[in-house]
Image: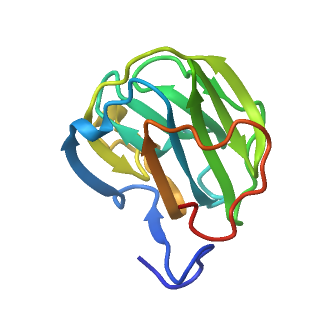
Amino acid sequence: MTTAPAQVGTGACVLNGSTSYLFVASSGDFAFAGDYTIAGWVRQDSTAVTGDRGIFCAGVGGGLSMGLSAGKLYCGPNNVAYGAIASSAIATDVFVHVAAVRRSGRTRCFVAGGVVADVADTRSYNAGAVGVGANSVNNFSAAGQVLKGHIDDLLVINGVGLWWAAFTPPAGPAM
């Protein structure tokens, strides 16, 4: 954690792009079968926009993953083709609000409150250990899989899709 820069409150998670990420032990809480919301503020370093850089990833195979592929927000099953992926990269070196929301069998990705991807998604995602700031395709540790930058105010809700239309990102904690 660091006290600067932060988008919300007084601290943000700093990730070095190779070895720093947060790890949460496996839990059934991270099996996503219905609606969900994953959202937060991401500040991607402009020197590391290649690869699949994880923001949130549960499980090694068949779990739910949200991250940046060449800077484009994606969400869907890990270890297989992306479920939803934006057509353009997010801004670098500034905090950007990102969200993945599933409601009634559809997943939408949002950047700065605007819808950037929308796909059908009725998959049940496996539970597993969680990497925050890492993509678990290679057990959280492969080069190019760890985000270089900051994550602030990450929100994960299993069972509720908070937003569905364009929205104004929260200036503070979403809940």
Q: What number of labels is visible?
A: 0
Q: Position of residue 165 (x, y in %)?
A: 77, 37
Question: Which residue appears at 30% of the width and 25% of the height?
Answer: 126
Figure colour scheme: rainbow
Question: Which residue appears at 31% of the width and 38% of the height?
Answer: 30
Question: Which residue appears at 55% of the width and 22% of the height?
Answer: 82
Q: Position of residue 131 (x, y in %)?
A: 34, 48
Asked which quadrant contains residue 9, the reply is bottom right
Asked which quadrant contains residue 163, the reply is top right
| Quadrant the N terminus occupies | bottom left
Residue 8 horizontal side relative to residue 58, left or right: right
Q: Position of residue 147 (x, y in %)?
A: 49, 53
Q: Position of residue 161 (x, y in %)?
A: 56, 37
Question: Which residue appears at 31% of the width and 23% of the height?
Answer: 61
